[in-house]
């Protein structure tokens, strides 16, 4: 009887160790931190910069996919308005620059596990530009004449600080530099969009789809 009791206790001890190992293995398999985390978001940005030394306002919209909280790829578009005050009789000596550009958005992200991240956004694309009468551009009856419009290519690198507010919200702040090809407008007081801009933006979406979904299930089963 004593021998049977000892064997039974050894059996229980072995079974307990096996179950613990199984639980540990299951935890490691289903909560592997190396699994891919996905994200998608819609972003809005506002920047202030300069074109040819004159104040320029830029507003942007972007849609992107985020891979493992480390790299973004998507589309970005920017509208801009620059108070150039071009001296020309057609514009009553108050011609302002207006236009937009858009293209491929790429953004590697560093320190993605921290509350504050560092990123290097890059836009590669094309756009169009023209002059408008600065005194009448916002008039409802203003007949906009884009006969002087021209197209250009642009590359815009930058650097951002990303603040992770929640799983669904990020705020960004940073600077960018626009480098465009030459465009031909009449008068030709400005031929490129080159210049720095700085501003802030907001991203709304889901940034960590797939993280800890199995861990929650295991906790619920316990």
Image (cartoon, grey):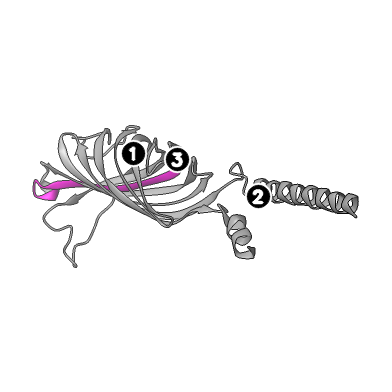
Stretch in magenta: 91-104
Rendered location of residue 185, percent (x, y): 26, 39
Q: Residue at x 16, y 64 (%)?
A: 139
Identify whether 180 is placed above or below 134.
above
Q: Residue at x 75, y 47 (%)?
A: 17
Which corner quadrant of the image does residue 126 belong to?
A: top left
Kindly state the secondary structure of the residue where label 1 is placed: strand
Local crowd size for mark 1, using a 10 Å CA cut-off: few (<14), some (14–19), many (≥20): many
Label 2 and label 1: CA atoms lie apart by 36 Å
Image quarter where the C terminus lies is bottom right
Residue position marked by numbered label 2 in the rendering: 27
- Which of label 2 and label 1 is nearer to you? 2
Furthest-bottom residue in this view: 140
Kindly state the secondary structure of the residue where label 2 is placed: helix
Q: Residue at x 84, y 49 (%)?
A: 6
Sequence-first disc among 2 and 3: 2
Q: Main secondary structure of the magenta part?
A: strand
Rendered location of residue 11, percent (x, y): 83, 50
- Please give left or right for residue 162 compared with residue 26 in the image: left
Sequence-first disc among 2 and 1: 2
Residues 219 and 196: in front is 219
Q: Is residue 199 magenta?
A: no
- Which of label 1 and label 3 is nearer to you? 3
Residue position marked by numbered label 3 in the rendering: 112
Residue position marked by numbered label 1 in the rendering: 160
Residues 93 and 209: in front is 209
């Amino acid at each position: 009887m004593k021998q049977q009791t000892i064997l039974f206790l050894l059996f229980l001890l072995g079974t307990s160790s096996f179950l613990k190992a199984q639980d540990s293995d299951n935890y490691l398999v289903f909560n592997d931190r190396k699994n891919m985390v996905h994200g998608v978001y819609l972003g809005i940005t506002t920047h202030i910069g300069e074109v040819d030394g004159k104040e320029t306002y830029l507003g942007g919209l972007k849609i992107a996919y985020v891979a493992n909280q480390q790299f973004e790829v998507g589309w970005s578009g920017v509208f801009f308005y620059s108070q150039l005050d071009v001296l020309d009789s057609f514009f009553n000596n108050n011609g302002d620059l207006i236009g937009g550009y858009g293209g491929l958005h790429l953004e590697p992200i560093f320190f993605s596990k921290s509350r504050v991240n560092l990123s290097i956004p890059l836009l590669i694309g094309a756009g169009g530009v023209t002059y408008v009468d600065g005194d009448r551009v916002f008039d409802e009856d203003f007949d906009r004449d884009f006969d002087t419009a021209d197209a250009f290519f642009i590359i815009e690198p930058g650097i951002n600080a990303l603040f992770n507010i929640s799983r669904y919200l990020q705020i960004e702040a940073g600077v960018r530099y626009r480098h465009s090809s030459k465009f031909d407008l009449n008068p030709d007081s400005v031929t490129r969009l080159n210049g720095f801009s700085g501003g802030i933006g907001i991203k709304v979406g889901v940034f960590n789809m797939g993280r800890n979904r199995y861990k929650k299930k295991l906790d619920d089963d316990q």
